[in-house]
Image (spheres, rainbow, N blue to C red):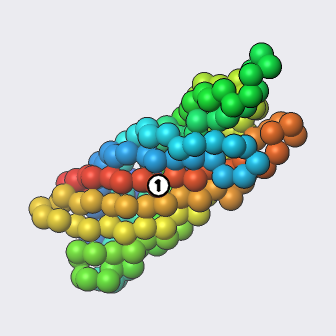
Amino acid sequence: MKKFLLAVVLLAGTFATQAQGLNFGIKAGANFSNFQGDLDTDGITSFHAGAVLELNIVPTFSVQAEGLFSSQGGKAKYEADGVVGVARDIKLDYISVPVLAKFYILPNTLSITAGPQFSFLVNDADDIFETKKFDLAASGGLELKIIAGLFAQARYNIGLTNVNDSEVRGDVKNGVFQLSVGYFF
């Protein structure tokens, strides 16, 4: 994973020296997450934060890559010590790398984003099921550039891979709605 992140940073540095339409920024916000599938859960609220890199290809299209710390999961209902319906937060922390196509509806103001998100598990604070180390998701959302580099985003990430590595719990996928604010320098 360290080699992958180093390659992303070096690639970004190469683009920075060659591209005039390169914007770098930071963002943070709230995650409203839940598990989809065979595990009975309720949603939890957590956070995400990280860096944003936008490469403008043409005035109406850009590619945006991000490196985010994202805490997500759900509140599981399960049986413990003979008691059914015990609720417990399952928090999974990831380093997420969305790579998004960005189509501007209003030039340099309102855009639609879509693309894959690659997430690498860095912390698994539960013992309900064994969590896989990699999660692939499809992301889609909206971004509004407000004024002088300030932007707001709304995005939904739907898990495409089973995060559960145990056959006992079945098919469990992440579902995360994100609200973010950020700043392009």
| In the depicted structure, whether residue 88 falls above or below residue 147 | above
**Direction top: furthest residue:** 81
Which residue position holds label 1? 177
Give the residue at x 48% y 67%.
Answer: 140
Q: What is the quadrant of the C terminus in the image?
A: bottom left
Q: In x, y percent, where is residue 31?
A: 43, 46
Give the residue at x 37% y 61%.
Answer: 154
Q: Observer-nearest residue: 147 or 61?
A: 147
Q: Amino acid at mark 1?
A: Phe
Tally the numbered discs. Answer: 1
Q: In x, y percent, where is residue 97?
A: 51, 51
Image quarter of residue 125: top right
Give the residue at x 58% y 63%.
Answer: 138
| In the depicted structure, whether residue 127 falls above or below residue 105 | above
Q: In x, y percent, where is residue 80?
A: 75, 21
Neighbours of disc 1 within 10 Å: few (<14), some (14-19), many (20+):
some
Q: Observer-nearest residue: 153 or 128?
A: 128
Residue 68 visible in the shown view: no
Q: In x, y percent, where is residue 69?
A: 46, 39
| Secondary structure type for disc 1 | strand
Image quarter of residue 94: top right
